[in-house]
């Protein structure tokens, strides 16, 4: 490599660093570069937690309930959020529930699970609300008393 080539590389590096230093991205936090429509709890996690500096191997991610519901985000945005949280060692949980929201929560859980699998992550669902009772207030899941009358104690 001649002196001319080294000078070109050095000059190019100086130009790139100068433009980077003058760019708005060089003086902003990670949260300021995130889409503005992300909820605050996600923004705080992404901005506060640095990416894990080493490979975590087979260790589990920490599953953070504060991530919450991602259903308002597009598939592209959910994928980005899940990937960025995983870089920080944080996993995403989907929440299953009973009642009217049951179907939509299952559909959302499947959507998130597909993204997690695509990214090579474990799928985690919180189904504890389903364990509070095997009835949800609908006639199909109601209890039957000693007289054959259906009843439910679900809210």
Image: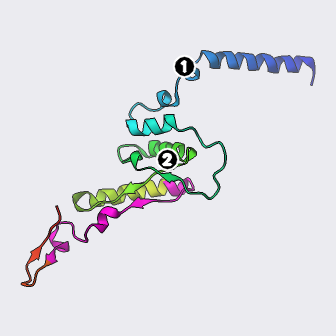
- Which x, y percent locates residue 113? 46, 57
Relative horizontal placement of residue 110, taking residue 120 as reference (left or right):
left
Which image quarter holds the C terminus?
Answer: bottom left
Question: According to the image, label 1 marks what residue?
Answer: 24
- Which x, y percent locates residue 17? 69, 19
Q: Residues within 10 Å of mark 1 (few under 14, many from 20)?
A: few
Q: Earlier in the sequence, mark 1 or mark 2?
A: 1
Secondary structure of the residue carrying numbered label 2: helix
Gap in angstroms between the C-alphas marked 1 and 2? 25 Å
Q: Residue at x 20, y 73 (%)?
A: 141
Judging depth in this view, the residue of 151 and 107 nearest the camera is 151
| 67 magenta-colored | no
Q: Residue at x 41, y 46 (%)?
A: 67
Which region of the structure is painted magenta? Answer: 116-143
Relative horizontal placement of residue 87, taking residue 103 as reference (left or right):
right
Which image quarter holds the N terminus?
Answer: top right
| 131 magenta-colored | yes
Judging depth in this view, the residue of 8 and 122 nearest the camera is 122
Quadrant in the picture for residue 50: top right
């Amino acid at each position: 490599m001649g002196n001319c080539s080294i000078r070109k590389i050095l000059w190019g590096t100086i130009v790139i660093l100068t433009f980077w230093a003058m760019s708005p991205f060089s003086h902003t936090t990670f949260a300021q570069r995130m889409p503005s429509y992300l909820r605050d709890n996600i923004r705080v996690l992404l901005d506060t937690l640095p990416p894990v500096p080493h490979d975590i191997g087979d260790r589990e991610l920490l599953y953070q309930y504060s991530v919450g519901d991602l259903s308002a985000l597009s598939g592209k945005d959910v994928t980005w959020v899940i990937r960025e949280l995983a870089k920080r060692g944080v996993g995403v949980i989907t929440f299953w529930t009973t009642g009217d929201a049951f179907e939509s929560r299952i559909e959302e859980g499947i959507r998130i699970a597909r993204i997690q699998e695509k990214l090579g992550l474990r799928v985690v669902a919180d189904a504890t609300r389903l364990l509070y009772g095997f009835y949800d207030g609908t006639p199909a899941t109601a209890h039957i008393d000693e007289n054959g009358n259906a009843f439910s104690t679900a809210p």
